[in-house]
Image: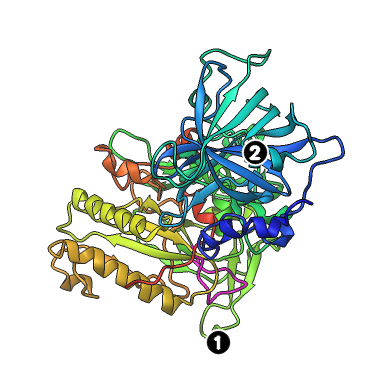
Amino acid sequence: MPADPHELLEPYRRKRDFGRTPEPSGDRSGTANQAGSDGDRRFVVQRHRARRLHYDFRLEIDGVLASWAVPRGPTLDPDVRRLAVHVEDHPMAYELFEGVIPAGEYGGGDVIVWDRGTWRPADTDDPDDPAEAVRRGELHLDLVGERLRGRFVLVRTGRDGASSGSTGKEQWLLLHKRDSDAVAGWDAEDHPTSVLSGRTNDEVKAAPDRVWRSDLPAEQASVPVGETVDGPSEDELTALADLGRQGTWEVHGRRLKVTNLDKVLFPPREGEEPVTKRELLAYAARIAPVLLPYLRGRALNMHRYPDGAARKGFWHKEVPDHAPDWVARWRNPEADPDETQFYVVVDEPATLVWVAGFGALEWHPWTSPTEAPDRPSYVLFDIDPGERTAWGEVVELARLHRTAFEHLGLRAYPKLTGKRGIQVWVPISRGPSFDETREWAERVSRTVGAIHPDLVSWKWQKRERGGLARLDYTQNAVNKTLVAPYSPRAAAGAPVSAPITWDELDDPDLRPDRFTIRSILDRVDERGDLFRGALAQDQQLPILR
């Protein structure tokens, strides 16, 4: 009689804190899925960068994924034998797990689905009971995957570490038989991408496309991060370019009245042309599909500069009476009579184009959603340089934040402000209040600041800081905002608040205003959205001691 999958998964569950790790919990809703009537079972191989790179080779047996860690990866070369360490069974839902296990958790590191497909036992007395073959220590199997195919053999060589040292786990060998699928010299490391997403471990680490929701049934738990929205067509962009000073522009399925298209909104940088309203509208239309997930379902504070970035701007929050009917609005139920009642919500790309046309050169969404305005989605860290702060000192403070978040086992996403500083967003699960996130951020900030007290002032008033930097944790409050990723900034050349990787802190050419609305789109095309992982709001804040 097959074992109870739920009982087989007890060792797996004991090793993990499902309040922190995004891995499937292996509860009873996700353990079914026995082999079909044709005898085929599922298998998956995951490329897993934990303390050391290895490949996790997993076979469906008795409703779970029997698992072996293969340090150098499986191979199709029949002359090569690979060490395979038998580890705890994993839930069937793990077949689709691809993402980042937080540092400090069991198996912490990034995971991609390197191969998957079906398998069936071969050369066995009882093909319906491969678990017995595993217990005996020798399993012959036929794989039909996207990369691995043909006859494989798993053979136990030692038990409880007796053959090779101190792991205390069963040591096996994984090898490929000499058949028509064998390939001499075949190396797993020559194939570094996911068969699910086509991405590498580095790309998944920088921006997980999906997050595992342990609170959902297994068949629903792997959910995409954000939604895909098409950009404007070439015809739409050409129509804007061909308009005179004003007219009607149809873009993203909406008709917008546009005026003063040749008006200069951003003064030029040396050797460049100034940026006009026409160029800003085109940028808003093109960046909207990337930016929309950070704005959707959130009130927007608009920093308006109707006369351009060379003149003084002002904050505008109330939806004007002349806004099109299709522009989404949110009424703040907590607003006093003299406060903003209705906020713009950028729920579709055309709304962002309208916001830009309204003179909002900077876009600042709330860090909490309209459905729960008192519950933040992020903890915010703002490295705000003073007059005496050199750029290298800003970078050094950012590196200290990186070290802090690595120590805490948290994903954190840095971006250039587009002006002088660096900001960091830490995505969190809904739950903590703004008071709690502000207190938590203050403790982290003061710990970081204590390492270089000569660089940091904690004075509230800028004139009292003596030109030193401020690590501003006070932005963690309702209706306090930091500029959105990819938003322009009101400065010469139309710089943008550009997401970066932590490794780019070591780039000697990095500057806080390096990317502009003229260069950031090429960067996104080449590198993808480096901030995308921040949309997976799945982390719990660790207790600080």
Q: Which mark is residue 358?
A: none
What amino acid type is highlighted by mark number 1?
A: Pro
Q: Which residue was labeled with disc 1? A: 337
Residue 456 can be seen in this image: yes
Query: In screen coordinates, is 66 left or right of 264?
Result: right
Front-most of 80 and 243? 80
The magenta segment: 365-377
Task: State which quadrant residue 423 falls in.
Answer: bottom left
**Rendered location of residue 58, percent (x, y):** 62, 40
Number of residue marks: 2
Quadrant the C terminus occupies: bottom left
Most prominent secondary structure in the magenta stretch? loop
- The location of residue 292, given as percent across then percent down, is 58, 53
In the rendered structure, which amino acid carries the disc numbered 2? Arg
Q: Can you say whether 361 is above or below 158 in the image?
A: below
- List the residue tagged with mark 2: 136
**On screen, 180 above or below 345?**
above
Residue 216 lies left or right of residue 50; in this view the side is right
Q: Position of residue 15 (x, y in %)?
A: 51, 59
Secondary element type, mark 2 = helix
Image position, residue 514 (x, y; %) = 33, 42
- Numbered disc 1: secondary structure: loop
Q: In front: 223, or 57? A: 57
Seen from the viewer's position, the closer of residues 375 and 514 is 375
Q: Residue at x 67, y 56 (%)?
A: 221
Spatial CA distance of label 1 from label 2 is 76 Å
Ranked by sequence position, the earlier of labels 1 and 2 is 2
User: In this orientation, does residue 261 appear?
Assistant: no
Task: State yes or no: residue 369 in magenta.
Answer: yes
Residue found at x 22% / y 65%: 449
| Residue found at the very far right of the displayed protein | 37
Bin the neighbour count of mark 1 within 10 Å (Cα to Cα): few under 14, some 14-19, many 20 and up.
few
